[in-house]
Image: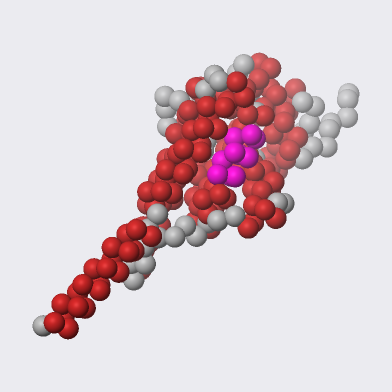
């Protein structure tokens, strides 16, 4: 009998993605999956509770790899929120492109049910936390509940924007996915232009000035 392999988390992920692509289907059971790859079934459960947990983690790992790459760049660390997010998008989609066959199979297989979104739930948590950490400038509403609603709205709209970009990328047939690059640049810049509060601040300041002047005149 062949000696069972000593494996780690990354091995299981690689085995899983390879199995899906080689067989054009998902493994039938953890037992069969472990036997095919010559490791103990118990080792699987040391890292994951189910195949769905593996799938969720794969998408989260794309995020983690992206952030790890970006944080090694002094240039990225010095960027403002807009350019940080642009850098994130371009690097994230480079990671997706390197694993496109698996992602296309998985997302298109689940596109008509809620499982497709469930598989991205860990990615969403990480991404919305990342958005919150960008400290995107917002209106100073001086009210904790309104500020919380404002921050949640930014996080949710950013998540929807990422989903739309992923959908565009899935359907993109241009060379080197250059249309996706254009989509990223235009959509991220547009979203920041909409969020640009400088003109609105000027209007508010002008309104305060008018109000004070009227009070003095009265």
Q: Which image quadrant: the C terminus?
A: bottom left
Residue 80 vs residue 41: left or right?
Answer: left
In this view of the protein, which residue sits in the foreground, 141 or 62? 141
Of the 4 image quadrants, the one containing the N terminus is top right
Q: From what the image shows, is residue 113 above or below residue 50?
A: above
Residue 152: image location, x then y, percent: 40, 54
Q: Is residue 196 left or right of residue 91?
A: left
Q: Residue 80 location, x and y as percent?
A: 55, 56
Q: Is residue 166 above or below residue 74?
A: above
**Residue numbers of the magenta segment:** 86-95
Can residue 207 be seen by looking at this rendering?
yes
Residue 135: x and y in percent read 50, 60
Q: Residue at x 55, y 44 (%)?
A: 86
Residue drawn at (42%, 27%), measured in percent from left and top? Answer: 113
Residue drawn at point x = 52 percent, y = 22 percent: 172
The scheme the figure's colours follow is: secondary structure
Check if residue 150 falls in the magenta segment: no
- Residue ID at (47%, 57%): 136
Compare residues 177 and 4 and report the one nearer the observer. Answer: 177
């Amino acid at each position: 009998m062949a000696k069972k392999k000593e494996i780690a988390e990354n091995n299981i992920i690689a085995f899983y993605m390879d199995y899906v692509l080689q067989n054009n289907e998902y493994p039938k059971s953890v037992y069969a999956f472990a036997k095919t790859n010559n490791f103990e079934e118990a080792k699987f459960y040391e890292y994951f509770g189910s195949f769905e947990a593996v799938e969720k983690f794969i998408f989260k790992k794309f995020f983690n790899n992206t952030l790890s790459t970006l944080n090694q760049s002094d240039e990225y660390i010095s960027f403002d929120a807009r350019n940080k997010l642009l850098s994130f998008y371009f690097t994230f989609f480079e990671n997706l492109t390197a694993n496109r066959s698996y992602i296309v199979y998985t997302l298109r297989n689940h596109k008509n049910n809620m499982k497709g979104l469930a598989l991205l739930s860990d990615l969403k948590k990480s991404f919305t936390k990342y958005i919150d950490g960008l400290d995107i400038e917002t209106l100073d509403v001086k009210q904790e509940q309104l500020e919380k609603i404002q921050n949640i709205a930014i996080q949710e709209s950013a998540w929807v924007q990422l989903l739309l970009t992923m959908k565009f990328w899935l359907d993109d047939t241009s060379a080197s996915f250059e249309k996706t690059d254009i989509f990223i640049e235009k959509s991220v810049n547009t979203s920041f232009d909409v969020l640009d509060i400088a003109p609105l601040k000027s209007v508010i300041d002008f309104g305060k000035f008018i109000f004070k002047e009227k009070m003095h005149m009265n």
